[in-house]
Each structure stands twice: as C-alpha cells, then as structure tokens.
Image (cartoon, rainbow, N blue to C red):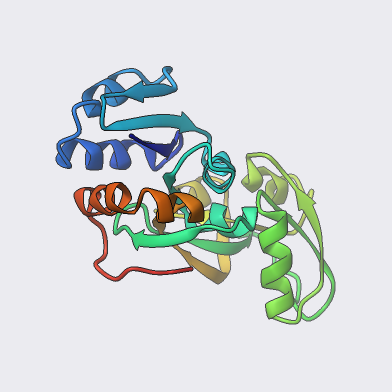
Amino acid sequence: MVTLALPKGRLFAPVTDLLERGGFSLAAAVKSNPRRLVFEDGELRVVVVKDADVPAYVSQGVADAGVVGLDQILEAGADLLRLRRFGFGRCRLCLLARQDRPAPPLWKPFRLATKYPRLAQKLLAQRGLWAEVVPLAGSVELAATLDLAPLVLDLVETGTTLRENGLVIVETWLEVAPYFVANRASWATEFEALTALVHRLGGDHEELSD
C-alpha cells in the first residue's frame, strides 16, 4: 500500500475527481468527508493535509507521494521528484498593486507582502531586485489595500479577487501548475505501485525528474 498526500485547499476537489476517475474505491469517502484526514481501501492510503504541508509529508517519507502546486514545492525547497504535471488548477504568481495609485518603481528598494517569503527572495534575486519581504499567512490582498506594503506577491487564477479588492497585476513572475511528486526513497522501493498510481491519475505525458 502506498500513501498519497492530498491538499485541502483549491486543489482538493479536482484531485478527488482524479481519484474517482482513476477507479479508486475510497474516492467517494474522501469527497464526502471533508473533515476526515486519513482514508484506506487496501491498495491506497490517502492523507489530507494543508497545501503547504504536502512537501514536508512527502519529503520526510510519511507519504510516498502527493499532489501539490509548484508554488508550494518551491516555497518549501523540499527534495522531491516531480513526476507528472496536471492541467487543472493552473494559475500565475503575480506582483500586485493597488489600482488607484502608481506601483513603486521596481529598480528601487520596496516592501513586498506575500505568503511565499522564501520563493519571493529567490524570484527577487533572479531579477536583480531588492525588497523588504513581509511574510503573511493569509489575506495578502489586504496588505496592499491597507498600505502594509505597496506590492504583494500572490496567486492569480480568475482575477475575481483582484477586482473585488481594487488590485491590478504589475508583473507575472511564475506560471504555477499542480504536480504529482514522490519521495525519492519511495520511488525506488515502491516503483511499480507509484508508476501505476501516476498512470491512473493521468496528467501531462512527459515525466519530470526535478
């Protein structure tokens, strides 16, 4: 039996749909019991955790594999195998500012609020920019609205939240998609089971080693 870590957030519904289409008998239980955290059906164990915790559960070997967004993979800096990319849940990690005032020039030091402080520092360095990064746990849009920081770095999917909070996109810094990731040791010891799981879940055909 292999253990699969699933994210609680925006990817939960499409991933449980994958389990259902893949013919896993526990899919119905996972979909109908959002408060339950562990499910087993004899061939698969599913653990449901916060999005940001999936890389930790997989990298530490508590779960053999998981489904998680590229944003969380890069923020965690975990040593994971990225084996399959999915077409659902794709979005962008964007630099955002208030619509009613000019964004500060990026060539000068600025303040940036984000739920991704580690990833933000990497992306800033790639662009040769410097910012004071303010880590937040949620409601990042509010940081710009209430002037905690003139710029925020956050995911944009449909743009509805931006419009509702009077924000605009300044730049897109990263294209984000969900990945099937695996623990390196599990990939060696549970190769056949994990390969079968990947194929049953589907996704893009190319396999990615890192």
Residue ID at (34%, 54%): 191
Residue 104 vs residue 101, the one in the foreground: 104
Residue 129, located in which quarter of the rendered image?
bottom right
The answer to whether 52 appears left or right of 148 in the picture is left
Q: Taking 66 as reference, is 127 above or below it?
A: below
Residue 184 visible, this orientation: yes
The location of residue 54, given as percent across then percent down, is: 52, 42
Q: Residue at x 19, y 27 (%)?
A: 25
In the image, 52: left or right of 144? left
Residue depicted at x 74% and y 44% = 146
Percent position (x, y) of residue 15? Answer: 31, 41
| Picture residue at 30% right of the left edge, 33% below the top | 44
Residue 147, x across and y down, in percent: 77, 50
Q: Can residue 181 be spotted in the picture?
A: no
Q: Is residue 39 shown above or below 14?
A: above
Q: Quadrant of residue 86?
A: bottom left
Figure label count: 0
Classify residue 26 as left or right of residue 145: left
Report the residue that reaches farthest toward the front: 189
Residue 126 appears left or right of 207: right
Work out which quarter of the rendered image holds the N terminus and state it. top left
Depth check, front residue: 62 or 121? 62
Q: Position of residue 93 (x, y in %)?
A: 54, 61
